[in-house]
Image: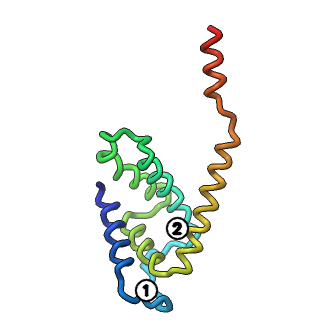
Amino acid sequence: MSRLLLVITLFLSLVSCDKKPDLNKVPPAPVNLMTEEKFTQVMVDVEILEATLKLKLIRKSDIRDRILIYYDQIFEKHGITEKQFRDNLEFYNKQAARIAVIYDSLEVRLGRMKSELDLKPDTTDALENLKRKR
């Protein structure tokens, strides 16, 4: 798997194994701290990529070669680096209340995107009908 996913997985494992985290202690902010809004926008794209990979919409043989390219495209789109993303992910994950707000917003946005896609007409049936008529 990609090194980014490995880093995220290891980080989340370490955070979840912490003995007694002090929820009132705010960790130092990274140098290039993203606003919660911008971080949420990045996470929308990350979640879409992760869902695409989980649903195997990308050929298995292409995943290893392309996953870093896909993440780089997300980072480029949002004008950030991989390090900035990791630092912000670590920062927000250590603040339960803030990350909860971010994930709530993420869930709403992804739900809205799904609803918009569900409202678009499905042209598959129309194409099938045209093929049958010929």
* Horizontal side of residue 105 vs 16, given as left or right: right
Could you tell me which quadrant the C terminus lies in? Answer: top right
Please say if 43 is above or below 35.
above
Is 51 located above or below residue 96 in the figure?
above
Assign a secondary structure to mark 1.
loop
Q: Give percent across and percent down for residue 98.
A: 55, 78
Within the image, what quadrant is residue 50 found in?
A: bottom left
What amino acid is found at the position of numbered circle 1 in the picture? Pro
What crowding class fits label 1: few (fewer than 14 Cα within 10 Å), some (14-19), or many (20 or more)?
few
What colouring does the structure picture have?
Answer: rainbow
Distance from disc 2 to disc 1, alpha carbons, whole Å, reads 17 Å
Q: Residue at x 50, y 59 (%)?
A: 78
Mark sitting on residue 56: none
Task: Name the residue that disc number 2 marks.
Answer: 39
Q: Are marks 2 and 1 in contact (CB under 8 Å)?
A: no
Is residue 117 or residue 89 the one in the foreground? 117
For residue 17, above or below residue 124: below
Callout 2, which amino acid?
A: Phe
Q: Residue 117's spot in the image, x, y percent? A: 64, 44
Across and down, in percent, residue 62 comes to 32, 41
Q: Please, what secondary structure does the residue beneath circle 2 have?
A: helix
Instruction: Give the percent coordinates (x, y) of residue 31.
Output: 42, 78
Q: What's the mark number on residue 28?
A: 1
Q: Residue at x 46, y 76 (%)?
A: 93
Name the one closer to the observer, 91 or 123: 123
Q: Earlier in the sequence, mark 2 or mark 1?
A: 1
Residue located at (36% from left, 68% from top) = 83
Residue 55, quarter of picture: top left
Residue 107 vs residue 74: left or right?
A: right
